Image: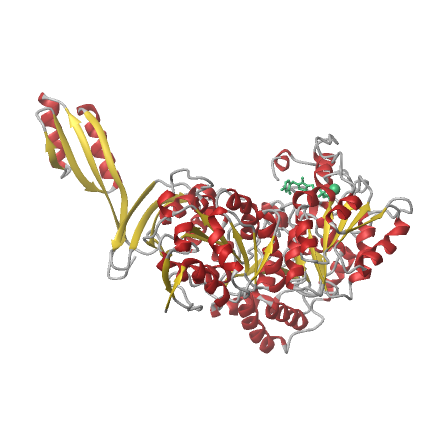
Amino acid sequence: MEEEKKHRHTISVLVDNEAGVLARVIGLFAGRGYNIESLTVAEVDEIEHLSRITIVTSGTPMVVEQIKAQLDRLVPVHAVGDLNMSGPHIERELALIKVSGSGDARVESLRIADIFRARVVDSTTKSFVFEMTGSAEKLNAFIALMKPLGLVEVARAGVVAISRGVDST
Amino acid sequence: MQRMIGTQIILQALVDQGVEVIFGYPGGAVLPIYDEIFKQNRLRHILVRQEAGAVHAAEGYARSTGRVGTVLVTSGPGATNAVTGLADAFMDSTPLVCLTGQVATHMIGNDAFQEADTVGITRPCTKHNYLVKDVDDLARVMHEAFFVARSGRPGPVVVDLPKDIQLAEGTYTPSDNSTHRTYCPRVEGDSVQVERAVDLISNASRPIIYAGGGVVNSGPRASELLVELVNMTGYPVTTTVMGLGSYPGTDAKCLGMLGMHGTYEANLAMAHCDVMVAVGARFDDRVTGRLDAFSKGSKKIHIDIDPSSINKNVPVDVPIIGDVGNVLGQINTLLKQRLSNSDPRKLDQWWERIEEWRSRNCLAYQKSDSVIKPQFALERLYQHIKDLDVYITTEVGQHQMWAAQFLKFDAPNRWMTSGGLGTMGYGLPAAMGAQIAHPSSLVIDVAGEASVLMNIQELSTIVQYRLPVKVFILNNEYMGMVRQWQEILHGGRYAESYVDALPDFVKLAESFGAVGLRAEKPAEVDAVIEEMLNLDRPVIVDCRVDKKENCFPMIPSGAAHYDMILGLDDESPEGTDQGLALV
Ligand SMILES: Cc1ncc(C[n+]2csc(CCOP(=O)(O)OP(=O)(O)O)c2C)c(N)n1
Ligand SMILES: [Mg+2]
């Protein structure tokens, strides 16, 4: 069989927010050998007890179709959307980035943060914590620039995504 | 709406779901449920000897009736013993509800006595599972479990029941059996795809229908529609091991089973067809052989209720998601209008080729007057039972494949075997379950001597309930299928495949209170089969067969359909290194 190209897909899964639902989704990926590049989950409807799980994965078209079909047949799953297949969409990620330093490096980190529209959410005389949202690439670029300036650690929330326009994802 | 104790809710839900029989084994965490069972007579409880036996029995019950099989086991080891059966039912899409006891909710996670993370352990081998933590969810969960088990592609569902929930008072709500908030499988085929399928079907010149267990699961109506489709089109049919009986096996249009030990004609027809109609089958590796060589030139139509079965292993041209019965109905309706003006001779050439392949007589074997050939034993068995009301189960191994080759099934739900998981020890308890469901029918487990020992304890259950189950052991003293692979792929080094120190099966039967019979020479086979059939009691037949017979045809793992081995003298088989790594 000819080697098919792998593509990155952002998949949005609306689920009942019940015990074990995340384990089901993760177990499915682990058990069937699909990869997870990023995963986020949070309740999005308190009254209906719905959560949205956003998964970034990659695979050949056949594998990605298989992933979606496998997700869709889980009992607590309401809907599976593939944002790469359903028109334009927006992806965002949040990161908290701690940088420590003094003198020029400290000033430089603040200057770059300003360019990237990262906000300072904590500061000591020796450190900053920046908060930043954006695409994963933008976050990666900022983190790379912080490395030589005293990057201490990073916490990232993973990708969340939603489709553009009036229709639901 | 009624106030009840948890255990009463459980029993009421079972009764409301139409459950008549439950297979189980007691223990601390389910004692309250057993107490409730003791007080009633609406449900019949069958006490097995090991929890795996309960699950396989429920599978036999389910597969032979089309209903949901029900199981009750205790927490910890009770639940873990049930796992093999659940995995088996999951692979073969068998509807089950398995109730497991659990330690009290406040003890969960504390490594309490007989605690196991049952929902964690069974998550990947069930269609769905529940841990009930609030007694007011209990009725809903019980009803949902049955809905999920039987709807769409059927499968096993576990309901884990902490002991305190069993004893708490809650509200009983009757079931609303028809819908579910999230789980609503599609049952009607998309009309555009159906139209495309009908186009392909009516223009095919080398067609084949490849029918699987989904036809059986859909119900007898699906089999009737399949027969109607074949009558209209004159197409050849081949079935998977799970699909045997979904189309009449004695009909001339039936090419028998396909796949690793399928017939020459079935596999070659699959390899050379121009239109393949896959009906409730899943392109399993035992069927396709080497994927990149699988039926390359054909257009493929795939009808299946489970969208994840479609395009999983083999890309298809016309996917139709829906219940096989419904979709076949849609296809037949359209075809009736189309075919009236088609040429009835159009398939003659294709059938000529098929008949040529068929004339290879691929199931032929070396006859013998001195040793019983396993194929001969099954041929004789078939001659005695073919007009009877009979249900067959099998264990796993060569005997299973010979049974699939030599016994013919003209109706669905008559043949029960562990196809997907290949579970040795399935056949005896499954026969027990089938016999419970059909007390006056003949039920035979075609067994291997190694497999049958894996759940032999269930003979005790069979005797206790006076079930006249027949166990027909093709005793070759080897794990024959393992020995065959070792002969063909591992240079004849028979590592640990000889089953030494076997019991005397006649005495074993007698010690359990069953009847034991033995056949050692071909001339004895008929008499022993007759005696077995005339006994209205459980019987074990120890049929001593050729120890080194191989099951052919065989497509070695990783080989293409056209690389079939018909017999060892016929061609020297070539294993590939890649093939060696395959199961
Ligand atoms: C539980 C389990 N363990 C191991 C196997 C691997 N296996 C497949 S067939 C077989 C041998 C079966 O021997 P027997 O029951 O005597 O049947 P025969 O092949 O001799 O007819 C084995 C060990 C299996 N299928 N199931
Ligand atoms: Mg054997």
Quarter-of-image position of residue B7: bottom left
Q: Position of residue A11 (x, y in %)?
A: 35, 50
Q: In the figure, B436 relative to B225: above or below?
A: above
Coloration of the structure image: secondary structure
Q: Nearer the viewer, residue B254 or A108?
A: B254
Question: Which quarter of the figure is the C terminus of chain B placed in?
Answer: top right
- Count of numbered circles on the image: 0
* Quarter of the rendering containing residue B178: bottom left
Which residue is painted at 69% across and 44% down in the image? Answer: B451
Q: Nearer the viewer, residue A59 or B401?
A: B401
Q: Does the rendering let one see residue B153?
A: no
Whether residue B487 is visible, yes or no, is: yes
Q: Position of residue B149 (x, y in %)?
A: 49, 59
The location of residue B489, given as percent across then percent down, is 70, 35
The image quarter in which residue B560 lies:
top right
| x, y percent for residue B89 | 56, 52
Judge from the rendering whether residue B165 lies leftward or rightward of residue B89; answer left or right. left
Q: Nearer the viewer, residue B145 or B7?
A: B7
Q: Residue at x 20, y 29 (%)?
A: A145
**Residue B504 left/right relative to B109:** right
Q: Quadrant of ligand 2?
A: top right
Vertical position of residue B269 compared to residue A99: above or below: below
Residue that protrudes farthest toward the top in the picture: A103
Horizontal side, residue B104 vs residue A46: left or right:
right
Give the quarter of the figure containing the N terminus of chain B.
bottom left
